[in-house]
Structures are given as C-alpha cells and as structure tokens.
C-alpha cells in the first residue's frame, strides 16, 4: 500500500481528471475476470471503465453478488453514448441481438426511486415504452432490477431474486470495472492547536480500497483509514490518497484552516471531554466557537430524554446562534459520519411552553432560524393522522401533542417534530 501511494503522490497533480489511473493493474483485472468465465467487451469512448460479459444465466441478484465478489458492480450507464457503445460492442463481440443483460440499476431501496449501484449519478434513462412498470406477474412482488435489451438498446425492469415459491427470471449480465476512483475530503476548519477531524470518502474504483494521509511534500504516510485528526498552529494543506483493489489511485487536497481560539479563563476542556466521553457522548470537532464544546449523544431517544441527560452533565441540547455555526455543525456531523446516515438530529429549540413561541433550552435569545419552507407547521408526521383519528396508534406519540421540538436535517434546515420521536442529539 505504501509503495503504491508513493507512486500515487509522484504522478498525481492532486486534481481529478476523468482519465484512467496510471497505477491500475489492467492485466491483473482482465486475467481475474477471464479466469472467472467473463468475456471482455471493448467499449469505445470509456477510458475510465472496463466491461465484462457474463454469459451464464443467473437472477439479477446473483449476477450482482458475483460482481461484488470481484470488487465491482453490474454496469451503470450514464449517457446515450455509453448505452449505444455498450450495445455496439456486445454485438461486435458476436453476442446475439436477442440477448438481454442485467445492469446495475435498482429501486429495491425505495420503489420508483431508481439508482445506480456503483454510485453513478442519476440522469440518463432509456426505458422501453411503458417501463418501468413494477409488474412481475406474481401477487405483491415487484420488479426492482434493470435489464438492457441488445435488440433496441432499451431497458426493462424485472424481478431480481426468487422469493419463496416465486421464481425470478434469469439472464446474462454485464459488469463495469471502474478505473478512476474519486476521493473527497470533509472537514478542515477549527481552532489553532486543537484537534480537527478530517474525513475521506471514495466513490468508484473497486472495493476494497484503502486511504492514507500525507503532509506534502513528504510521501511518507502519516496515517491510514478514512478519518484523520490533526492539530496545527497555522493553515496547513494535507492530502488524502486512495488505492483500490486493482491499484487504481486518486488524491484530494484539503486546506486545514485555523483561527486563534481562546479558552475562557477557568474552564477545564480536558475534564469536559473526559466526562462526556465517559458517558457515551462523541465529540464534534471543527466548530469555530471558542465559548462552546459540542458532543453527539448517539442514543436514539425522545427530545425530552436527550435534554434530561444533557442537563445531568450541566449542558443543554445545542442552541444555534448563526448561519456559520449551523453550517459548521452540519459539516462536523458529516465529517463524523453521522449526518447522512442519521437524517434527523435533535437540537435544543422548543415551543412546548407556548405554541408557536420557540425558545432555546439554554436561554439563548439569538433570533437566528433556519426552517424548511413551510415549517414550523405543528403537524404530526405523514401516516399518523389516520391512526390517531381511529385511535389505533401503537406508538408512544401522543396524537394531540402536535410538534413542539426541533430537528436538524442533513441540508442544515430545521423541522418541528413530536418530542417523543426517537433521534440522536447534539449538545
């Protein structure tokens, strides 16, 4: 890994360009796939990708499992040009025109919301007329996998795997091996001489991958892993380098920007840290506010319970005093890996004492707000109305309580919610 990343730093300009990584072991990729029975398909105009055809008939899910076992996915198709080139290349390879092949498009996670398994952005589609129709012919079983037809280049949705006695269709498949991993880094602002957390994430390439951190111009890794904590006195540039299964590499720069932060006299930050960490909290770094420290309570619980736990340690759920503080908290949550995995997070704003009069639990009187459009609306979540009306709710939520507590969403915007809903919190 270290030797490969030394090469990575030697050849990289630290700017991603859509071209094949020069460190990829192409021969090893081709040999591995051919040994597994795949046929290479030579698709023009795609320097970041290799394509392989599996002539064995499998279900969609089995075909994807085979691809994942080799570090890749069923093929994504991002444009009409790529779609046409794949079809032309397969026909040129002697594959019959009546062949249909599984591709890596699915709405299994959310019906009707199709996405590419390899992380390719949605945009281009090429469905047959009337498709996708989610009609498998079996009662209560939909169609969650995409299939490409060589006869016309169009797509169809089909059932992905056997379910009980219901047998899914089988077909050939096409796999795409991406040669251009893309690494990005979150974090990078905070107080001088205090820990700042950096977080790297990678899309594309083949799994597994490994990330290393560098301080240019040195090519010796400082650390490995997707997160790295730094403490610097002045603005400093770091580099995250990623290497995938086949030696394909990418790098990303991050400027760690710091400002002097003076700890108020008499405070004992290390004691605060140790106390909260001992009670299961997780520290949030990179928030440039010298008068506050921030922690995640990872327990998913009601707003009331989260505030009560914070008060036991002399704190409150967070009050947010400015757009900058709001943005810093969102960035810190993202860097800590919480924000997009946990879409609702309690903050310390409530109108439980007087409907419509929202106040901060720590008595902060700042007027900053960042509501979603149409919020706060004091309406219980979608789906509760009917059960509350009929008296059949099997929930701790009191149907008549309305929405008196506030949650922060990944966008940084706020929404009022019933206080009994379970969620993590920031204090």
Image (cartoon, helix red, strand yellow):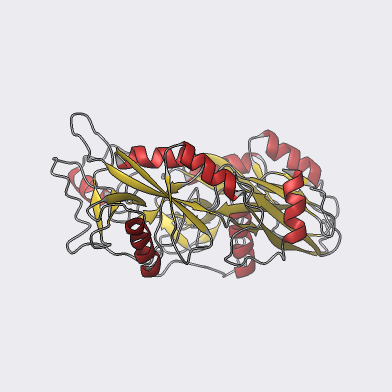
Quick check: 243 left or right of 124? right
Residue found at x 81% / y 61%:
261
Residue found at x 62% / y 52%:
24
Query: In the image shown, does 63 or 357 lie closer to the viewer?
Result: 63
Q: Which residue lies furthest to the top in this view?
A: 164
Asked whether residue 328 is in view, the answer is yes
Query: In the image shown, does 346 or 403 lie closer to the viewer?
Result: 346
Q: Where is residue 84 in the image (x, y as percent from the top left)?
A: 35, 66
Query: In the image shown, does 331 or 216 lie closer to the viewer?
Result: 216
Query: In the image shown, does 18 or 272 lie closer to the viewer?
Result: 18
> Number of marks in the image?
0
Q: Where is residue 280 in the image (x, y as percent from the top left)?
A: 63, 36
Q: Where is residue 59 in the image (x, y as percent from the top left)?
A: 29, 39
Residue 263's image quarter?
A: bottom right
Q: In which quarter of the image is the N terminus?
A: top right
Q: Where is residue 341 in the image (x, y as percent from the top left)?
A: 50, 48
Quick check: 39 left or right of 190? left
Asked whether residue 288 is in view, the answer is no
């Amino acid at each position: 890994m270290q030797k490969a990343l030394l090469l990575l730093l030697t050849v990289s300009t630290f700017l991603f360009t859509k071209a094949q990584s020069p460190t990829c072991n192409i021969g090893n990729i081709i040999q591995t796939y051919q040994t597994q029975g795949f046929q290479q398909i030579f698709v023009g105009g795609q320097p970041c990708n290799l394509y392989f055809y599996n002539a064995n008939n499998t279900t969609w899910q089995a075909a994807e499992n085979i691809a994942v076992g080799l570090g890749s996915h069923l093929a994504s198709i991002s444009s009409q040009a790529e779609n046409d080139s794949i079809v032309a290349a397969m026909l040129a390879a002697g594959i019959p025109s009546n062949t249909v092949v599984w591709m890596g498009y699915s709405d299994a996670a959310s019906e009707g919301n199709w996405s590419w398994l390899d992380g390719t952005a949605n945009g281009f589609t090429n469905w047959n007329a009337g498709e996708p129709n989610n009609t498998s012919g079996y009662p209560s079983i939909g169609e969650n996998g995409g299939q490409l037809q060589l006869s016309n280049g169009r797509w169809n949705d089909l059932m992905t795997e056997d379910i009980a006695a219901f047998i899914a269709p089988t077909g050939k498949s096409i796999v795409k091996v991406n040669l251009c991993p893309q690494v990005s880094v979150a974090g990078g602002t905070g107080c001088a001489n205090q820990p700042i957390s950096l977080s790297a994430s990678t899309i594309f390439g083949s799994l597994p991958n490994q990330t290393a951190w560098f301080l240019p111009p040195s090519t010796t890794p400082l650390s490995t892993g997707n997160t790295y904590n730094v403490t610097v006195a002045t603005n400093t540039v770091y580099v995250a380098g990623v290497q995938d299964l086949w030696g394909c590499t990418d790098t990303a720069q991050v400027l760690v920007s710091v400002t002097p932060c003076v700890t108020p006299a008499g405070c004992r930050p290390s004691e605060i840290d140790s106390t909260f960490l001992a009670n299961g909290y997780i520290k949030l770094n990179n928030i440039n506010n010298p008068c506050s420290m921030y922690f995640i309570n990872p327990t998913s619980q009601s707003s009331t319970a989260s505030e009560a736990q914070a008060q036991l340690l002399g704190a409150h759920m967070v009050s947010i005093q400015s757009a900058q503080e709001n943005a810093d908290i969102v960035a810190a949550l993202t860097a800590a890996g919480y924000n997009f995995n946990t879409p609702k997070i309690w903050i310390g704003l409530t109108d439980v004492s007087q409907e419509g009069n929202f106040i901060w639990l720590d008595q902060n009187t700042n007027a900053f707000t960042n509501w979603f459009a149409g919020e706060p609306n004091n309406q219980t979540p979608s789906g509760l109305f009917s059960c509350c009306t009929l008296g059949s709710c099997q929930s701790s939520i009191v149907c008549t309580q309305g929405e008196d507590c506030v949650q922060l969403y990944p966008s940084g915007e706020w929404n009022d919610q019933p206080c009994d809903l379970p969620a993590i919190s920031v204090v």
